[in-house]
Image (tube, rainbow, N blue to C red):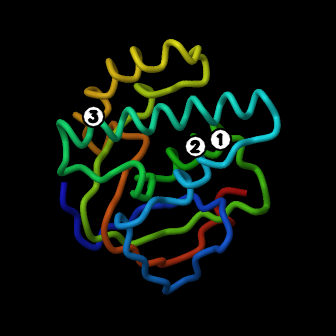
Amino acid sequence: MEIRNQLYLHIQNKYPYWDIGDTKDIGKINSTYYKNLHIPHPIALKEEERLKKLRRENILESVRLESYPEKPSRLKGLWVVPNEKCTMDWLGALGYNSPMIKILQVELTGEIHYANEKHIHVTNLQMNEIDTIIYANAQKYWKGVEREEANEGLFAGSVKVIEDVTHKFK
């Protein structure tokens, strides 16, 4: 779905941080999230989780390319949230209470896909279950939901940082 000059929130947890007024062109190169999934983790449990997420992302990208090529790629897109409630939910789910987290209000112009990530959880799955379950749920994820039902937006296009709103969530 194409959007123009719409406001969303973005949870940023990786340095270098974006500054107010910065503009970014999203969707042409792999995201930091996807790049980091290729870095082995020295702790076995975290390494298993990393491998599960990497497998999930590769399956979802395969299904997207085959059936939904017009949608933004999870490998290259930017995750945004449509409102403050979803931001609070994500901060809790991700365990983000770090002073390193920044929450930015961003203005977006480009393509957005509204989804509910409940279809693609891998935390409680065994490695041998991921292919079957994620393939089965990938269609639900890529068919999407309305903005009001979404807990995440996947975006590709032009991003402008409007305001640092981190203080509203501390």
* Mark 2 or 3, nearer chain start: 3
Q: Residue at x 28, y 48 (%)?
A: 113
Residue underneath mark 2 = 90
Q: Amino acid at mark 2?
A: Trp
Residue underneath mark 1 = 94
Find numbered disc 1 in the image and state the secondary structure of the residue it sits on. helix
Q: Residue at x 25, y 67 (%)?
A: 110
Q: Is residue 23 above or below residue 29?
A: below
Q: Amino acid at mark 1?
A: Leu
Name, please, the residue furthest toward the bottom: 21
Q: Nearer the viewer, mark 1 or mark 3?
A: 3
Q: Nearer the viewer, mark 2 or mark 3?
A: 3
Quarter where residue 59 is shown: top left
Labels 1 and 2 touching (C-beta < 8 A): yes
Q: Residue at x 66, y 63 (%)?
A: 14
Q: CA distance from mark 1 to mark 3?
A: 25 Å
Taking the image as shown, residue 120 lies to the left or right of residue 140, namely: right
Q: In the rendering, at what x and y percent does residue 159 appear? A: 39, 73
Check disc 3: other Cα within 10 Å, few if <14, some if 14-19, many if 20+. Answer: some
